[in-house]
Image (cartoon, helix red, strand yellow):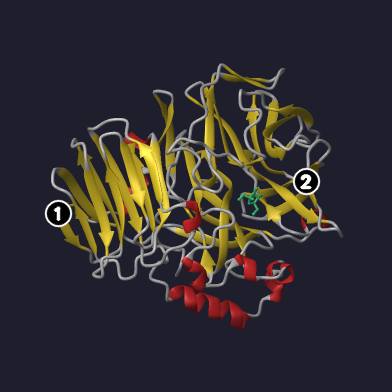
């Protein structure tokens, strides 16, 4: 497979104008032959997708952008690719939303968020520039998307005066008369932080410094910060790098996602007041850089990148990499962020089929609902040769085992992930789409999100005593027509 490490810097930083139509057609052709390409998840037609960007509800639609490298399934020159949808069933493909075409973003339009205001969606992003010594020169910038869909850049609003070269991924919101921004940064002491800025006019930003919590020394960089309120509680959500743990459950991936719930952000001291212990939303193999936004119904919706930096997947052989998670509504319950797939996705579900032990699959895009009140159970997805992935549980823990897949990869990071089981009786939702599985456990207090690779997957089996209902899932429209 074509690995990131096999590409030269010059190859990775080629722009879309430098890629011939023949090589684009060849990539698309290979991708179309991939039985692992999803049908109801967003994935790139070719090249690499990473973080969701600029998520917003604007002009009657959900707008999603994502980080995209067109040259191939590698990290290189980054663009923002733009989609919109009213219902998560029909999508409109708008192509590239932001190109790296300015001096300040000459080496990529990096991640950021959106703020909808006065009939425009303001798209905040990091201008990633590298100087002649290949040192990064990051700046925070913005562009304006108007109701007719035109996007215009407005340049740099924050330069990097306080942090190392790791200073990126702005997320902006409004509170009273103040605009607030968080940025992911590495302090001069090489610790990760979520940095707060304040503004009255969106142009002049006042640096307030890192948000203060008990975790002022956790990892060496926090990427993709998000800050929001749900039900009068404040949530810091971020993707820390350089964190590990002795626990059998926590921080097992190369990079992780974490959140901290608190009462409120004190704007004078930049302190997150009365906060809880750090927690993780996901315990699978592939979940990173989640971002959230509010829609017209007041729902706080989260979308993540299903993938991780520095990990190549077998999809590379088909010239694409990375996909977006299903949209998940967030709520807070018992001190946890609770995630549930948006009800809009029910429109894709076929009729209910009760599963007795084994189901021969006639599609590999489906969902199952498990009702369990037994201590132990196993759900297996397998092919005729016995290659499989196994989702199982004891009384106290869930386990996802990828050690018997047809195509193994990233084994140096382990082939099993575990999560605490908070109750015996619970309903578990499992969404499968060709080469991705999203499992909602503990009533959505945790998820296990992962890619998997089983050639000719054709059977699902479940142990006795777990009431299991299956629904085929139809493809979404407008993404690959
Ligand atoms: C996270 C990240 C961001 C950055 C972007 C570049 O995956 O490294 O910090 O803005 O990806 O594509």
> On the image, which quarter does residue 74 sit in?
bottom right
Query: Horizontal placement of 350 versus 401: left or right?
Result: left
Label 1 sits on residue:
357
Q: Residue furthest bottom?
A: 22
How far apart are labels 1 and 2 at the CA level?
54 Å
- Position of residue 18 relative to residue 211, above or below, is below
Please rate how many residues cluster around mark 2, counting C-alpha atoms within 10 Å: few if below 14, some from 14 to 19, many from 20. some
- Mark sitting on residue 165: 2
- On the image, the x and y values in percent for residue 234 come to 55, 25
- Position of residue 272 relative to residue 375, above or below, is above
Residue 228 visible within the image: yes
Query: Horizontal placement of 180 versus 305: left or right?
Result: right
- Position of residue 441 relative to residue 454, above or below, is above
User: Is the CB of the residue bearing disc 1 within 8 angstroms of ligand 1?
Assistant: no
Q: Secondary structure at mark 2?
A: loop
Residue at point 70%, 32% (across, down): 195
- On the image, the x and y values in percent for residue 259 come to 53, 32
């Amino acid at each position: 497979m074509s690995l990131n490490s096999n590409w030269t810097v010059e190859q990775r930083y080629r722009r879309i104008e430098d890629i011939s139509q023949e090589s684009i057609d060849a990539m698309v052709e290979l991708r179309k032959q991939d039985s692992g390409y999803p049908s109801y998840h967003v994935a790139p037609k070719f090249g690499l997708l990473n973080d969701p960007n600029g998520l917003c509800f604007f002009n009657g639609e959900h707008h999603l952008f994502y980080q995209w490298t067109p040259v191939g399934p590698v990290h290189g020159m980054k663009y923002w690719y733009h989609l919109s949808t009213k219902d998560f069933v029909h999508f409109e493909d708008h192509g590239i939303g932001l190109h790296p075409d300015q001096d300040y973003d000459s080496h990529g339009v990096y991640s950021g968020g959106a703020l909808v205001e006065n009939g425009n969606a303001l798209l905040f992003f990091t201008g990633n520039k590298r100087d002649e010594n290949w040192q990064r020169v990051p700046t925070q910038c913005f562009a304006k998307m108007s109701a007719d869909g035109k996007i215009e850049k407005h340049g740099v609003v924050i330069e990097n005066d306080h942090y190392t070269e790791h200073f990126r991924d702005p997320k902006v919101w409004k509170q009273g008369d103040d605009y607030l921004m968080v940025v992911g940064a590495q302090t001069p002491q090489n610790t990760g932080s979520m940095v707060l800025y304040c503004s009255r006019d969106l142009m002049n930003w006042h640096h307030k410094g890192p948000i203060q919590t008990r975790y002022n020394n956790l990892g060496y960089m926090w990427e993709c910060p998000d800050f929001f309120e749900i039900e009068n509680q404040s949530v810091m959500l971020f993707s820390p790098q350089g964190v590990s743990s002795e626990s059998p459950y926590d921080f097992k991936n190369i990079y992780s996602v974490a959140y901290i719930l608190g009462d409120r952000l004190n704007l004078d001291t930049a302190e997150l007041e009365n906060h809880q212990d750090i927690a993780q939303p996901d315990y699978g193999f592939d979940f990173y850089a989640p971002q959230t936004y509010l829609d017209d119904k007041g729902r706080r919706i989260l979308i993540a990148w299903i993938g991780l930096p520095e990990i190549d997947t077998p999809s590379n052989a088909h010239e694409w990499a990375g996909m977006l998670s299903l949209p998940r509504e967030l709520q807070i319950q018992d001190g946890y962020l609770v995630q549930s797939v948006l009800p809009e996705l029910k429109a894709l579900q076929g009729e209910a089929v009760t599963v007795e032990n084994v189901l021969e699959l006639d599609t590999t895009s489906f969902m199952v609902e498990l009702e369990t009140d037994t201590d132990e159970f196993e759900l297996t997805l397998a092919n005729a040769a016995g290659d499989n992935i196994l989702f199982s549980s004891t009384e106290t823990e869930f386990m996802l085992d990828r050690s018997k897949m047809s195509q193994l990869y990233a084994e140096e990071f382990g082939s099993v992930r575990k999560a605490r089981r908070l109750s015996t009786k619970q309903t578990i939702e499992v969404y499968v789409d060709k080469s991705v599985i999203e499992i909602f456990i503990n009533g959505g207090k945790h998820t296990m999100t992962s890619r998997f690779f089983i050639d000719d997957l054709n059977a699902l089996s479940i142990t006795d005593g777990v009431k299991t209902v299956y629904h085929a899932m139809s493809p979404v429209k407008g993404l690959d027509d």
